[in-house]
Image (cartoon, helix red, strand yellow):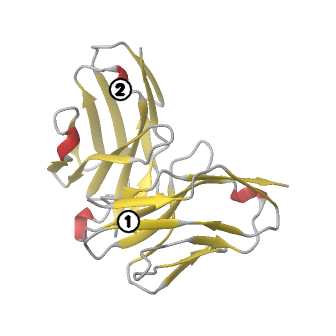
Amino acid sequence: GDSVTQTEGPVTLSEGTSLTVNCSYETKQYPTLFWYVQYPGEGPQLLFKVPKANEKGSSRGFEATYNKEATSFHLQKASVQESDSAVYYCALSDQRGSALGRLHFGAGTQLIVIP
Amino acid sequence: DTTVKQNPRYKLARVGKPVNLICSQTMNHDTMYWYQKKPNQAPKLLLFYYDKILNREADTFEKFQSSRPNNSFCSLYIGSAGLEYSAMYLCASSRGGTLYFGEGSRLIVV
């Protein structure tokens, strides 16, 4: 079946440093890939999604490229802020239409940014 | 308004007792989902409704029930709670593949 593996947290960084959260996936289908972010006390929310191989998604200074050959979708940010402290989930969907929200999530990576 | 509301936020239940969790959304989304999240594990899909059609995951088929009396509401029902049901339950609705999550219902079974 489908699976997603991502960097195990917590990841602790100082403000202004760069972030990479690794995400690798396995599927026999043609997935849409997602990054979700969950701030303390809130539910997860979409950061961005990329439906096509070799394309890049970005939002709020975060970006990730759908690398079909490497089956990876690593999340990067050049300079993190304290407000980026949250849990980040990589996810994939191998469905279309009304079932596109049927997601396989990674276990999440907690990011702690120290001012 | 992209709000999904869940009730209760916290639930303490005894082993063997039933549990009913409620989710509502006002975005007129046709699909609603329930995910289970345990510490250090990935959120796991339990079931989803597309309109009035319920789809349950094979490995949790007998453990959870659900109803959707109208487009806005969806419940998650556990007939007899066991310790293994202790988790955060996340409801979401979707449009165009984007999930909009509620804040979750934390269930503790003792």
Residue sitting farthest toward the right: A115
The residues bearing labels 2 and 1 have C-alpha atoms spaced at a distance of 26 Å
Q: Is residue A57 above or below residue B45?
A: below
Residue A7 x/y as whole percent = 56, 58
Q: Quadrant of residue B24?
A: top left
The quarter of the picture where the C terminus of chain A appears is bottom right
Q: Quadrant of residue B12?
A: top left
Q: Which mark is residue B2?
A: none
Q: Amino acid at mark 2?
A: Glu
Subunit ID for the residue under disc 1: A
Residue A57 x/y as whole percent = 52, 79
Residue B25 visible in the displayed image: no
- Seen from the viewer's position, the closer of residues A6 and B94 is A6
Dot 2 crowding, Cα within 10 Å, few <14, some 14–19, many 20+: few
Element class at badge 2: helix
Q: Is residue B103 above or below residue A28?
A: above
| Pointers 2 and 1 within a single chain | no
Residue B66 x/y as whole percent = 21, 37
Q: Is residue B63 above or below residue B92?
A: above
Q: Amino acid at mark 1?
A: Leu
Q: Going 33% across and 73% down the picture, which residue do you hit?
A: A31
The residue tagged 1 is A92
Residue A49 x/y as whole percent = 45, 72
Q: Going 27% across and 56% down the picture, which residue do you hit?
A: B31
The residue tagged 2 is B84
Q: Going 41% across and 56% down the picture, which residue do you hit?
A: A105
